[in-house]
Image: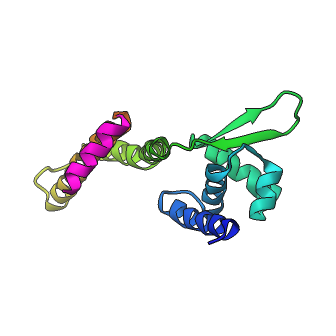
Amino acid sequence: MKYNEAKEKFIQAWGSLGTSWGINRTMAQIHALLLISPEALTTEDIMEQLNVSRGNANMNTRALMDWGLVKKEIRSGERKEFFHADKDIHKVAVQIVKERRKRELEPVIEILEELKNIDGDKNDKKSKALSETVTNIQNFSKKINKVLETAVKADESWFWGSLIKFWK
C-alpha cells in the first residue's frame, strides 16, 4: 500500500473510531492527521489535507485542545498557529478516558446522588423500586469510576500488565 493510500485509510479509520469515544468524525480525522504528521501543522495545512473549511478546522482543533489531545505551538516570527498531537498512544488513551469520565460518568454520579433521597413512603412499591434501581446504578457507577481513576493514575507498565492478566 502506498503512503497516501495508507494515510487516507488511517485518517478515515480514526475518524470512525473517534465517534465511538464521543467526538465527531472531523475532529477525530484532524487528530489522526496530527498524530501521523512529523511536524506541527497550521490550520491551512489541516484544511488542505482534509478538505475541510476554515471554520470546521478551527472549531474542531479548539475542541481537540479542550480535550487535551492537541497543543498549540507559537513560533517566533510566525503569525500562524501550529498544532501538534502527543504521539504517545498510552497518554492519548488516558486523556480520552479522563475526558469521557468527566463528561459522562461524573454527571451521572451527581444526578444519582440527588435521586438517592426520595421523599415519601419508603414502603411504597414504586418509590422502593426507584430507590433500589438508583442505588444499584450508583454503586455500579462508583465502581467503574474507581477503576477508571486507577487506570488514569497508573503508569503504563502497570496498566498493560494488569490488562494482560485480566485477559488471560
164 magenta-colored = yes
Task: Say if 52 sits above or below 77 in the image.
Answer: below
Residue at 56% across / 44% down in the picture?
A: 87
Q: Position of residue 75 (x, y in %)?
A: 81, 31
The single residue placed furthest to the front in the displayed view is: 2
Would you identify the image quadrant in which residue 90 lies?
Answer: top left
1 magenta-colored = no
Left or right of 39, for residue 128: left
- On the rendered image, what quadrant is the N terminus found in? bottom right
Left or right of 118, for residue 32: right
User: Mostly what secondary structure, the magenta segment?
Assistant: helix
Residue at 25% across / 51% down in the picture?
A: 164
Viewer-proximal residue, 16 or 55?
A: 16
Task: Say if 111 sits above or below 126 in the image.
Answer: above
Q: Which residues are magenta?
A: 155-168
Q: Position of residue 124 (x, y in %)?
A: 14, 57
Q: Is residue 32 visible?
A: yes
Left or right of 2, for residue 78: right
Left or right of 76, for residue 9: left
Q: Position of residue 47 (x, y in %)?
A: 79, 58
